[in-house]
Amino acid sequence: MHVRLFADLMRVAFKSITRNRLRSLLTSLGIIIGVSSVIVLSAIGKGSQSLIEEEINSLGTNLLIVFPGSSHTGGVHRGAGSFNRFTMDDVEKIQKEATLVSSVSPVVRAGGQVIGGGNNWNSEVNGVSAEFFSIRNWEIEYGSFFGEKEIKGNRKVALLGKTVADELFPDQDPTGEKVRVRNIPFTVFGVLKKKGQSQLGQDQDDIILAPWTTALYRLKGDRYIDMINVSANNTSDLDAAEKELTTLIRASHRLHPTEDDDFTIHNQTEISDTVTRTSKVMTLLLGSIASVSLLVGGIGIMNIMLVSVTERTKEIGIRLSVGARSSDILVQFVAEAVALSLGGGIIGVALSFFASMLLNNFSSFYTLISIDTVLLAFAFSGIVGVFFGFYPALKASNLNPIDALRHE
């Protein structure tokens, strides 16, 4: 019974506000803009967050990256990468003694000019182990990955990132071709699948991967490796694996308990949590800014309802004189305000989906509309109607029937 009464009340309210369609549309404009803005801006924030999380996941599986550095020299604190003591002894110790990691790979950086296919390109060469590909979720497009045979034999083979392959050997499979890095010939073993740009604008495909032995002894000519990539057994093991790595590397470097670490460990959860937290704050900020227009729309509804009360004073007087209660008048005008607000909310939701589609298809933005945001924005538009429509409705319900009937 109450549901039918509410439905009848809203039907009468919608019928009343459609008598002057243009005025009702202009009145609801603030609500329309507010609802659509809240949904679209929140969708942009959630879309960006989704892309960032996807990119972080593409970095690797349960990834931990160990950088050299964080040493104190002469009272000066140096950051990650500033003081390198990493050797293959550290990698072997982790491989033998770590219980919470599944894969370990050294990374040796040795960039330089690359010549091949009649073209040249400046890129970074990373010397890695066979486990690196599973750690960093790399897939192959042409050819195959190199393995322990190539690593132990210091073989001069290379896997090209998609950008490097396209620059040196456009529109072809370069597997088996020769490239020269610092005048050292390498045989192309294959081409890696495209990963695209990072959120910082770095091209993840502008890279060449080679056996770590070849990069360390033939290209770099050094005994120190630049970093260690580690994959934990499970996501839940990341923090415990980080502590285990810290203990093992400190033991490998023979650090006294009072000495600071001479290395830095970053784990995937820390990176993801930081980025996600920042993204959520930005999404909340954007939504808060957009919600201001909902309040402006509410003020517009209050103004037009006050005008409506003045215009319909005689009608109110007639209803009161024939037996209508003040509460009936109050409910009627509140219902009309809510109808205006919800009507604007419906149009705003539809507009937000259309705007989201345009942004996804014709801009660099990626939007992800959440049903929770849609429901929240729509519900808020109804609350705005009740809040800002109550005062004009109360004013109408308090009119004196005799005075109202005399109104011209």
Image (spheres, grey):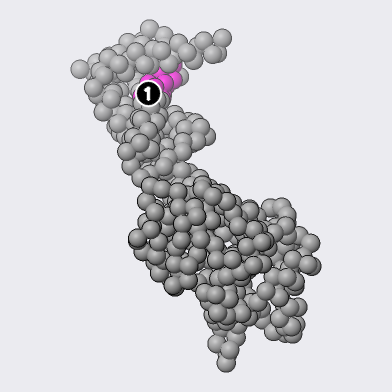
Instruction: Give the magenta part as a residue range.
Output: 328-340
Q: Can the viewer see residue 184 in this picture?
A: yes
Relative to 28, is 2 on the left or the right? right
Depicted 221 relative to depicted 1: above or below: below
Which of the 4 quarters of the picture holds residue 295? Answer: top left
Image mark count: 1
Q: Considering the numbered disc 1 on the image, is that residue within a helix, a strand or a loop?
A: helix
Amino acid residing under circle 1? Gly
Residue at 46% over, 36% down: 369
Which percent across, then down, holds residue 382?
A: 44, 29
In magenta segment, residue 321? no
Q: Residues within 10 Å of mark 1 (few under 14, many from 20)?
A: many
Disc 1 target residue: 343
Relative to 7, is 406 on the left or the right? left
Name the magenta segment's main secondary structure.
Answer: helix
Image quarter (top left, top right, bottom left or bottom right) of the C terminus: top left
Residue at 73% over, 78% down: 252
* 17 or 389, nearer to the observer: 17
Residue at 72% over, 57% down: 102
* 391 or 132, nearer to the observer: 132
Which percent across, then down, holds residue 23?
A: 24, 24
Which percent across, then down, holds residue 293?
A: 34, 40
* 21 or 71, nearer to the observer: 71
Depicted 324 relative to depicted 237: above or below: above
